[in-house]
């Protein structure tokens, strides 16, 4: 008996240090990998944008780092205000597989949504310091610059909407990229990225640093040029709205009173009543193509509303990406051929058609909380006289403004287009900025409470 007890005690005393050593090595390895996780995750996302077939691999890569985070920190993610809304959004995904009539179309879009959500949480957990926020802001700025430069070789230019842009202007661009891009798609992503480097340039130029500073200076001009050349009316309307909102935020940053801002706005409205402005508007809109575009969009929106009127589609959706076949089955298109309506041409209608009204409510809740986060970041920057933090918050806030305004006429920032995870990257950056900003001391204003989802 004593021999057995001695042997048991000996085995425990021998293996316990070994187990502690192995656990320590595993935790050290997990910590090391977590420190560098943004690099493989970014490469995986870039690969999935380049090739849709790599979407499952990209999602698995991000999921693996979540498991490592759980191993090292004891949790998959830190708590965020959007957890409840994202949880509701995830609950709609099993239904989208049950209702879809084309699982081969739905599957990659679901993977794209899951990849975007996982990317959002990766950014929130990785960007825990101002230096990392600056690194991610630089990465997003470089992404916008790369899109603008790549547009010269990949966009299918359709230069016939605006008379002041002659078609001969587009002869300087040659389509040499293996994958071509619709100009409205390119414009949709440029207009949501563009406010970030612009705001950092105007508000945070003193603290952008030697790395972000040059790119914040170089990126906005080519992005703005490509946006104009795409002739996307929805994107240009969103861009104009961004200029108005960012201009108002700039004036507040410079301590201009609200009374003077209102006075300036009244003068701009009076300026818009001048005959020259009306003549320019008539030139842009009084043509057959514009009237035809409006007619086609209205018919597409009517089909989306028709889908939502059919039970149970309002609750479950029809399955991600299946708008065109379902809409054609319910009622034939009159002014367009079905292949010209792959989506609802309205971001909010598209999400409702894909995931049902509950999915739309969940998505809108995430959007609202991201807007609150960006606003809080800008307000903390204003209170602390921190131009860079103010610029980061204002840029992210204006990105959401662009997303909303552009979303009224297009849905390319949703699941059917390969760069869709970039929207979640911006959301992750906004939430991470809030997490970092709220830990900083704020002398002139109390620390604001964040609403929960």
Image (cartoon, helix red, strand yellow):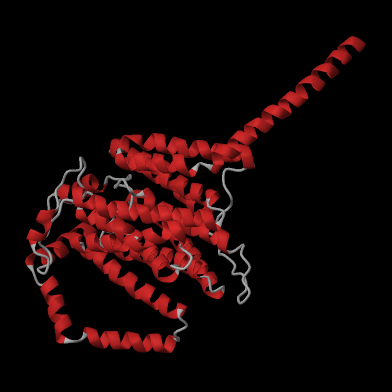
| Residue sitting at x 16%, y 65% | 294
Residue 45, image x, y percentages:
39, 42
| Residue sitting at x 49%, y 54% | 85
Is 95 left or right of 179, judged from the image as shown?
right
* Residue 190 visible, this orientation: yes
Is 303 left or right of 75, judged from the image as shown?
left
Residue 115 found in image quarter: top left
Residue 228, image x, y percentages:
21, 64
Frontmost residue, 96 versus 444:
444
Question: Which quarter shows the N terminus?
Answer: top right
| Residue sitting at x 40%, y 40% | 43
From the viewer's perspective, is residue 73 above or below residue 365? above
Frontmost residue, 395 versus 418:
395
As drawn, the residue found furthest toward the front would be: 210
Residue 123, image x, y percentages:
49, 50
Frontmost residue, 264 versus 102:
264
Count of numbered badges drawn on the protein: 0
Residue 309, image x, y percentages:
30, 56
As drawn, the residue found furthest toward the right would be: 2
Is 183 left or right of 379, judged from the image as shown?
left
Is 160 left or right of 237, judged from the image as shown?
left
* Residue 310 visible, this orientation: no
Residue 95 found in image quarter: top left
């Amino acid at each position: 008996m004593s021999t057995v007890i001695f042997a048991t005690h000996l085995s425990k005393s021998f293996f316990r240090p070994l187990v502690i050593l192995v656990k320590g090595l595993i935790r050290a390895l997990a910590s090391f990998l977590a420190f560098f996780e943004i690099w493989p995750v970014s490469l995986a996302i870039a690969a999935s944008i380049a090739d849709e077939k790599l979407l499952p691999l990209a999602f698995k890569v991000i999921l693996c780092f979540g498991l490592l985070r759980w191993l090292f920190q004891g949790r998959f993610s830190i708590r965020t205000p959007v957890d409840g809304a994202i949880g509701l959004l995830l609950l709609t995904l099993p239904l989208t597989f049950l209702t879809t009539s084309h699982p081969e179309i739905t599957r990659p879009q679901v993977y794209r949504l899951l990849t975007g959500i996982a990317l959002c949480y990766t950014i929130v957990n990785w960007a825990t310091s101002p230096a990392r926020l600056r690194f991610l802001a630089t990465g997003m700025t470089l992404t916008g610059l790369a899109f603008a430069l790549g547009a010269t070789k990949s966009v299918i230019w359709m230069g016939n909407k605006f008379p002041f842009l002659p078609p001969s202007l587009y002869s300087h661009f040659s389509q040499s990229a293996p994958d071509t891009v619709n100009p409205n798609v390119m414009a949709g992503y440029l207009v949501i990225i563009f406010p970030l480097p612009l705001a950092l340039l105007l508000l945070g130029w003193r603290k952008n640093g030697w790395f972000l500073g040059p790119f914040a200076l170089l990126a906005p001009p080519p992005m703005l040029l490509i946006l104009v050349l795409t002739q996307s009316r929805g994107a240009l309307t969103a861009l104009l709205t961004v200029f108005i909102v960012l201009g108002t935020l700039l004036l507040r940053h410079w301590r201009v009173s609200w009374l003077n801002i209102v006075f300036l706005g009244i003068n701009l409205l009076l300026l818009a009543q001048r005959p020259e402005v009306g003549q320019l508007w008539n030139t842009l809109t009084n043509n057959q193509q514009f009237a035809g575009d409006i007619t086609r969009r209205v018919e597409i929106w009517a089909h989306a509303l028709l889908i939502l009127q059919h039970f149970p589609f309002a609750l479950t959706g029809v399955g991600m990406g299946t708008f065109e076949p379902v809409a054609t089955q319910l009622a034939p298109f009159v002014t367009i051929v079905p292949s010209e309506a792959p989506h609802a041409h309205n971001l909010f209608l598209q999400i409702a058609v894909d995931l049902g009204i509950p999915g739309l409510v969940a998505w809108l809740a995430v959007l609202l909380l991201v807007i609150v986060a960006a606003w809080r970041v800008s307000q903390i920057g204003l209170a602390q006289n921190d131009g860079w933090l103010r610029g980061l918050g204002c840029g992210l806030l204006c990105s959401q403004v662009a997303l909303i305004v552009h979303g009224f006429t297009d849905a390319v920032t949703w699941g059917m287009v390969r760069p869709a995870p970039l929207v979640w990257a911006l959301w992750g950056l906004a939430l991470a900025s809030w997490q970092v900003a709220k830990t900083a001391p704020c002398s002139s204003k109390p620390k604001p409470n964040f609403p929960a989802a």
